[in-house]
Structures are given as structure tokens and as C-alpha cells.
Amino acid sequence: MTTSITTINVNGIRAATKQRSEINPGFLSWLDASGTDIVLMQEIRADTEQTEAALGPALDAGWHLSMTESVVKGHAGVGVLSRSAPKAVRVGFGSEEFDATGRYLEADFDIPELGALTAASLYLPKGAAEPTPSATEKETAKFAEKKRFLDEFGEYLAGAARRRRHVVVGGDWNIAPAELDIKNWKGNLKNPGFLPHEREWVGARLESGWTDVVRDLHPAVDGPYSWWSWRGKAFDNDSGWRIDYQLANRSLSRRAVKAFVDRADSYDRRWSDHAPVTVIYD
């Protein structure tokens, strides 16, 4: 028996669950057909009551929801949807600044086929370009915020990698780690998500016990991309970024056997600007 774990930035759960057209029934239809066991969600952008209402049919069907919303209304928010109830849930990573901002949540499971598992959902700040003399105060603040998050969360991940259980952190990392992970990498060298210090930060995580299991299973290929702008022909031209992925510790990464991006068949079938990224562990 295998265990499937999916990470998806839903780009607002209330919008994602709406039926947009006859050919685009939304997130709930995808969930029914996915066959996945655990869904790590980001950018829920709703409180618990609103989220439970949006996910009502799934919860009625037996799915379990664990989530944390942001203190900033309508912003961020992460959660875990699971077929079995978690044994424990933890919000945040011990950060006085970020734990109330709806950016990190862990859920523990005991899975017969896999063993003890911690599955975490992460929504890392987007940040901003490195400040210049002409940068606005807001841009400078966003750059500094992401830097602080990376510093704190990096220390937390160093300890999490050493836990004596399987651990996976999936989410919207808002960093494309390498040139293969972004279609137009030359045009984005100075943009947030592809800055040198951001890519170096991901590289340091990979050197400290974590494995990017999607890249590990798809070496030396472009993408597979998981985010495309709503604007222009980015989706049609597959001009995307690979910013949604799963980092697994050593014990779990050895169990990863397949990974894929569930890219919509066409632009008008999308219910988020991101696509679900699933890893199957055996």
C-alpha cells in the first residue's frame, strides 16, 4: 500500500471550491478524483468557519481538516486535509513573529503502511527584490521580512530533519531553487523567488538532511512547473515556476517512488494559479 501526499496553493479556498463553469467544477471535484491521502493547502485566505463551509461536501464525506488562519484577515492561512484524523496538530515553528500569520502547520499521523509521519504545510513569504536606493519602504520591509523568516525557519528545519520519524514539509516555498525550475530564469535573476541568497538557502537545506523529492524523481528536466501567472499566455506556453515542492527527511525520501504535477488540461479548467504537486510514498 502507498501513501499519496499533495501540496497545493489553493489561492483562496472559497474561490477554489466554486464551480466556475461546466468544464471547471473546482477544487472539490479535483479532490474527489485525486486519490490522494493528505492534502497540504496554502493561501486558504479564510477563517475556520468559512473554510469548513467551503469544504463542507469533503468533510461530510469523511475528510479531516486541520488549519490555522492569519491574524491578517483574508491573508495567508495553511491547512491539512487528511483521510484519517491526525494524532496531533501544531501551529507554527516557535516564532514570536510568524506563528500567528498562518504560514506553517504540522500534523502527525500513524500510517500502517508507512509508519509515524509528520506532514507540514508551508506558505513562505514572497518577499521583494533586494532593496536599492529607489526602493519603497514597503518593498524594503517585504525583503527584510522574508530574510527573517528564512533565518528562523532554516534553524527549525535543521532540527526537524533529525526527528526519528518520517517528516515532509510541502508547500508554496516561493523560491525556484535552480535554473531548471523557472522557464525564464535569465529574466528573473533580480526578482524575488530567484534571488541568489534564496536559492542558496534552499541549497543549504538540501545539504542538511532534506531531499527535494520532486526534483530527485525528475532530474535534469525543465520543471515540472507548478505556478503560472494568470496574465498573458504563461500557462498556454508553459512559462512557469517550480515553487511548490516537498522536502522530505532521509527516512521518508527513500520511500518516494513517484511525483507529478496535476496540471489542468487547459487555461479555463484552472481553479488556482498553482497546480497540485503529488508525491507517492511506498
Image: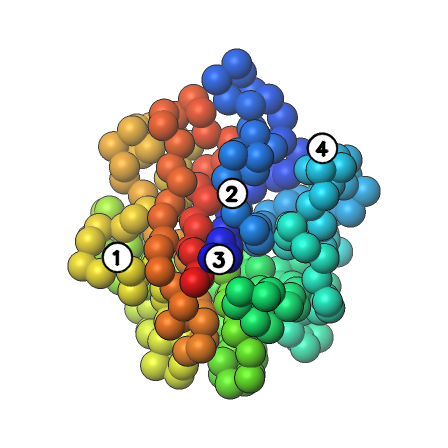
Residues 166 and 95: in front is: 166
Q: Pointer 4: residues within 10 angstroms few (<14), some, or many (20+)?
A: few
Q: Pointer 3: residues within 10 angstroms few (<14), some, or many (20+)?
A: few
Q: Depth-wise, is mark 1 or mark 3 nearer the camera?
A: 3
Q: Pointer 1: residues within 10 angstroms few (<14), some, or many (20+)?
A: some
Mark 3: secondary structure: loop
User: Along the polypeptide, which appears first: circle 4 or circle 1?
Assistant: 4
Q: Quadrant of residue 244?
A: bottom left
Mark 2, residue position: 35
Q: Quadrant of residue 176?
A: bottom left
Name the amino acid, label 1. His
User: Along the polypeptide, which appears first: circle 2 or circle 4?
Assistant: 2
For the residues labelled 2 and 4, say whether their Cβ atoms are less than 8 Å apart: no
Name the amino acid, label 3. Met
Q: Residue furthest top?
A: 22
Q: Residue at x 43, y 22 (%)?
A: 268
Q: Give the CA distance from mark 1 to mark 3.
A: 23 Å
Q: Is residue 270 left or right of residue 15?
A: left
Name the amino acid, label 2. Gly
Q: Position of residue 70 (x, y in %)?
A: 71, 55
Mark 4, residue position: 57
Mark 1, residue position: 218
Residues 190 and 82: in front is: 82
Mark 3, residue position: 1
50 in relation to 85, above or below: above
Q: Position of residue 143 (x, y in %)?
A: 48, 64
Q: Give the CA distance from mark 3 to mark 2.
A: 13 Å
Whether residue 82 is visible: yes
Q: Give the CA distance from mark 1 to mark 2.
A: 21 Å
